Amino acid sequence: MHTFSPRLRGPARLVAALLGILLTSGCASYRPAVSADAGVEVPPGWSQPDSGGPQPLAQWWRGFGDPLLVELVDAAQRANTDLGIAQANLREARALRDAAAAGLWPNLSVSASARRSGGGGASTGSLFDAGFDAAWEPDIFGASRHGVGVTEATAQARALTLAAAEVSVAAEVATSYLQLRGSQSRISFARDNLAAQEQTLQIAQWREQAGLGSSLETSQARSAVEQTRAQLPVLRASIAQTGHALAVLTGQPPAALDARLAPVAALPQAPQALALAFPAATLRQRPDVLAAEWQLRAAGERVSQADAQRKPALQLRASLAWSAATLGGLGSIDAARSLVASIGQTLFDRGRLNAQLAAQEAAFEAAQQSYRAQVLTALQEVEDALSALAASRDRVGALDAALLSTRDAVLLANNRYTSGLIDFQTVLDTQRTLLNVQDSLASAQTELATNHVRLYKALGGGWSPAATNPGNPL
């Protein structure tokens, strides 16, 4: 580092000399160009048609009309551990931003000391010193300002990462709750069918005792009962594990919600009306996409900072100092004053600074690709959610129709068997079909509800951009 450090003799001559050196070095660092659309051709609309009137996305879970679901999501947003980590990371990023911004201002320090000397058992005198020192590095080429820009962009990205975590937590809580209610519906169907099959078993036993039926029919009926009974422990375990997951999501021990979730309740239904924003507007709603934009800006600021660090650095230092034999005499003695200005410029570093710039440029290109990938992923998630939602609706409709027909078939089979028109195996088959259709319908209805949640998450629902107010990153 070559350094030019004159002491102040003629302030005007010093300033002129320094400015001349700076001007010969060029004053502009460059910033890489960024694109708000990440180079992705955003479609004008979605492949699936709009399904109705507008619905707010910030707290979409309230649209399910289930007070306990609302309570659980609100509790998770207060106490979820992942959100706590994201909040702490945000506070750290903002503190680092403030520390970097403070570095743009001059440094002022004060010092004081007292000495007493003597010899041969006698004191010879005291000396008191006091002084002020100031130092400042004017940010001529913007290295420090770009450093502040990096921390500011990082803080904004952390704020949006917190918002993205809120979106994910709300969706995870809602999905788990809907799956729990869906499992309760499945276990209710299984119990109803178990009761019906037990009645069939009892009839088969009576017929065998009366000589109207065979032991084969009784064994077949008992086998159907036990197969249905075997499904109950699996469903109970699923309900328990989902309840444990909900408790942990809300920051509580696993069994904390068992009593609240034990009463069986119907599966909440999502509102059918949902107006889809245009894809470009949806991308502005998604906090993970906005966070990627701010990370791209931070990468651009690092490129500019690395470029500015190749330019000369100007430093100014000033000091005032007093020395006196008595403490009261410090203010009555003229202060020793100094003003030092220096310019430093690297002459030879074997390309280290240029290599650092090249590294930051490569990191910026990687951030561009990450942002582009995030945009494409967001578009894909919405399209996938829309396709899954449409398929779920069709499946529920078909299973509804199948359930009506299967119930009719069970009644007919029972009546004909009683009349001796069909064999017992037909009765068992229709009962088994009814259980399968009921179970499939309960699963399909749960899937339909969770696909609504999936769509809300893909659209960026679950946070308020106005509350976070990240600004325009690009």
Image (tube, grey):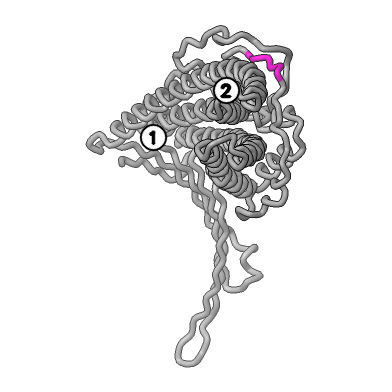
Give the quadrant of residue 101: top right
Q: Is residue 409 above or below residue 138?
A: above
x and y, in percent, of residue 360 in the image = 36, 31
Give the quadrant of residue 235: top right
The tag on residue 22 is none
The tag on residue 309 is 1
Task: Answer left or right for 212 relative to 23.
Answer: right
Q: Inspect this view and state whether residue 411 appears.
A: yes
Q: Is residue 324 above or below residue 43?
A: below
Task: Answer left or right for 249 relative to 31.
Answer: right
> Is residue 13 one of those drawn in magenta?
no
Question: Disc 1 on helix, strand or loop?
Answer: loop
Q: Which residue is mark 2?
A: 422
Tell which of 368 and 19 is nearer to you.
Answer: 368
Q: Which residues are magenta?
A: 272-277
x and y, in percent, of residue 457 in the image = 59, 27
Q: Main secondary structure of the magenta part?
A: loop
Check whether the beta carbons of the residues at disc 2 and disc 1 lie within 8 A of each other. no
Amino acid type assigned to the residue bearing label 2 in the image: Ile
Amino acid type assigned to the residue bearing label 1 in the image: Gln
Residue at (63% x, 41% y) in the render: 206
Residue at (47% x, 27% y) in the render: 296
Residue placed farthest to the front in the image? 211
Q: Is residue 210 above or below residue 119?
A: above
The N terminus lies in which quarter of the figure? top left
Which marked residue is nearer to the observer: mark 2 or mark 1? 2
x and y, in percent, of residue 446 in the image = 62, 29
Q: CA distance from mark 2 to mark 1?
A: 91 Å
Check disc 1: other Cα within 10 Å, few if <14, some if 14-19, many if 20+: many
Tell which of 266 and 148 is nearer to you.
Answer: 266
Check disc 2: other Cα within 10 Å, few if <14, some if 14-19, many if 20+: some
Tell which of 121 and 346 is nearer to you.
Answer: 346
